[in-house]
Image (cartoon, helix red, strand yellow):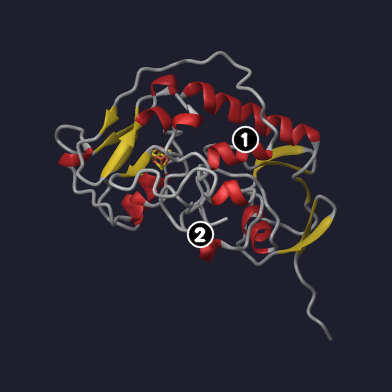
Amino acid sequence: MSEEKNTFMLDGVAVEFNEGDTIMDAALRAGAYIPHLCHNPEFTPHGSCRVCVVGVNGRQVSACTQPAATGLDVDNGSGDITDERRRLLQMLFVEGNHVCPGCEKSGACQLQAVAYYTGMLSPHFTHFFPKRAVDASHPDTAIDYNRCILCELCVRASRDVDHKSVFSISGRGIGTHLTINAPGGKLGDSTFAATDKAAQVCPVGAILPKHRGYDQPIGERLYDKQPISIVGDVATRKPGNGGDSHGG
Ligand code: SF4
């Protein structure tokens, strides 16, 4: 007698899940792409970017934190869900200074790739043009705060894997920002090393390695070759500016 599997419906297709899975866990394992930015399967789900919003039985939830359950009817592809994701992405674009044509991460940036995936053609909202500094104090790594989307992946990686807690988030509302836990607040004064896990996880061009800018030409980068919706080839992806490390 065959064992009955736990399943839920994702855009009309049955997806198997294991006990403890979130909708995102099960979808990624099944090869179904749910757009995301702050999610990385290597870390505890955070649910902050909300780009993985899905409709579940008529209500909107974050797929990375919503437990999978039998009988769920998950909407990952309707026009309403795509519109909501596009709005969230547009807000991320105007809150920072994301100048894709001049960004070293272009072609390997998840924010850019997800924006393409959702068909975002313009920022729609008025740009904030915040004044943010670049921290080039570290010998091997630069931080461009203009591109930080506050996903907290570097915070989680530095705390949970590197056991250094170099990064944290400070402030509130529009004043929320990434900070470096060092006396002068500079990366070069911290215990950060380019070999840290935290150096590998930034989904955008905010944490960038020095000394190898544009070593992979634009046009030949990960998302220049394949859309971000193609999943299941995580092992072949390289971290850093030429690849990505979001694991999904
Ligand atoms: S620097 Fe990168 S990894 Fe860290 S919070 Fe900002 S966007 Fe996320």
Question: Which one is in front, 184 or 124?
Answer: 124
189 shown above or below 134: below
- Asked if one can make out residue 126 in the rendered structure from this viewpoint, the answer is yes
Quarter of the figure that contains the C terminus: bottom right
Residue 175 % position (x, y): 38, 21
Residue 236 % position (x, y): 52, 64
Residue 148 % position (x, y): 42, 33
Question: Which one is in front, 140 or 56?
Answer: 140
Residue 105 % position (x, y): 45, 40
Quarter of the figure that contains the N terminus: bottom right
Q: Which element carries disc 2, helix, strand or loop?
A: loop
Look at label 2 and name its amino acid: Arg
- The residue depicted at 70 percent of the width and 37 percent of the height is 60
- The residue depicted at 69 percent of the width and 30 percent of the height is 84
Q: Which element carries disc 1, helix, strand or loop?
A: helix
Q: Which residue is mark 1?
A: 115
Q: Quadrant of residue 178?
A: top left
